Amino acid sequence: MESIDFKLFVEVDNNPFILFDASGHILYLNNAAEMLLCYVSTKELYDLALTYAPKTFGHKSTIHSLEYESFSFYSLMVGYETDEQIYLRLYNKPLVQTKISISNESLIPTDINTLLEANITLFQLESNASISLFVDQELPAFKLDQNYFSIMLRKALSSFVNSPSLNVILKLVVGEYILIDDKKHQMIELILKAPKRTVDYDEEINQLANQTHIASSLKPETIKFQIPLII
Amino acid sequence: MGKEKIELFYSTSTKIQYITKGLELGKSLFVSSLLIGEANIGKKSLVKSIFPEAPWVDGRDMIKLKQALKEHNELIICNFELYGDYNINDFNGKRIIAISDATYFPAHIDSLFAFIYTVPSLKERPEDIKYLGDIFFKEAKSTFMTEDILPLDLKDIDLTYNTKSLKKAIFEHQIYNTITPDKIEQILYNYFEKELGGNNDYAKYLPIFENPLIKAGLAKFGSQLKLSSILGINRNTLRKKVYELGIN
């Protein structure tokens, strides 16, 4: 039988795969792992591999929930056949598939900076937090369901109402896309970050985000929205 | 001119300035906003000053409201009923500003409006009481064609009904302090013409004259001894009157 080059399959697999040497240096990583390393350090992943490594040569799968920014994994596999190399493979949590199509009727060309400013103004009525804004004023107008988005953003900001400070970052993400109705859209990222926040509205925020094709990532100190740039 | 000045919304309150900014930003957005807060605190004037051309509809008439929501992309709803039958699609893609005198909102409203502003009452805006007080004083002076009188201490005014209470207190103060004897006589005449009809009315209505006379005299001259000589009556008579009238 002709030998098959399995490396290609690993390369394009959505589940991150990393091969380390004995010192924790990366010998090989696939595309998904390359993306993951934008958000988590090599050392953290190597330590993870060592923690969940089998006691002796071989391969071991562990069901373990892991969250790195917008990446969520439900399981990992670690294996080694020699003392020189160890691999880590992370298995993506299945995503809930949204059946919601884009309804053009509700989408209105929007200057997101104006919408954000109006929401921050409302937030300032209730909060004494000092706000640091890092926004890209040059972002193009794009189509958005303004009412749903504002309700979602109001609730997200409400999570930080008792925080002493709030960092707001709004930027265009290069190289990542959101797929809606089989069409790729560029992505704008809105990050709200503070020393503390309440999680009371998280479920509602996720629902509203889902309804508006926005990927939401809610962490104890951070809320991140990835918004499709629909022109 | 005076009327125009009162209708134009003005406030130095920081909270009101934030609300104004939020509504101004909303002029370029198609979002639904709700303003809640006690009656007579300037919600309608504020909205009118920011959206002078927008059509208005009374939210108490649900049929007219539903029709207006179909016809307009920009709409101001006054007297908005919080428990009305609404769907978020009635509001999506439109610039809606709803105004309600409610001081809280139920959960379903929270999911209907993009922006919910709680407008502070007049009591919470002491800086605005002075400004509005000056406007009402000028209006009262103009209305009654009177000159400056002793200023009213605005801190003592009961502001239960916000600007209405303030205006009422200032107008009453203006009348009480500029009224002439012939007008007092006319007021009493009207009152007695309406009320008289018992069998002991002289004794019943005499305190209306005596009470303010003795109270004001005691406040002005300090002692019953001095007041009795001012009034030209015996001090025992005055003491008896003070006792009968229950004046402290």
Image (tube, coloured by chain):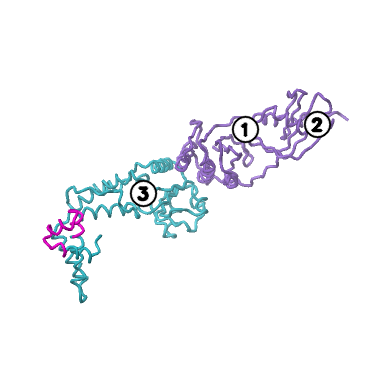
Is residue B218 shown in magenta?
Answer: yes
Amino acid on which disc 1 is placed: Glu
Residue pictured at 24% horizontal, 54% vertical: B171
Q: Tags 3 and 2 in contact by the CB under 8 Å rule?
A: no
Nearest to the observer: residue B187 or residue A109:
B187
Q: Which mark is residue B123?
A: 3
Q: Quadrant of residue B232?
A: bottom left
Q: Which chain is purple?
A: A
Q: Is residue B139 visible?
A: yes
- Callout 3: SS: helix
Q: Which mark is residue A176?
A: 1
Image location of residue A178, percent across then percent down: 62, 37
Residue located beneath label 2 in the image: A79
Q: Which chain is cyan?
A: B
The reply, left or right, for residue A57 in relation to residue B83 is right
The reply, left or right, for residue B205 in relation to residue B37 is left
Q: Which residues are magenta?
A: B214-237
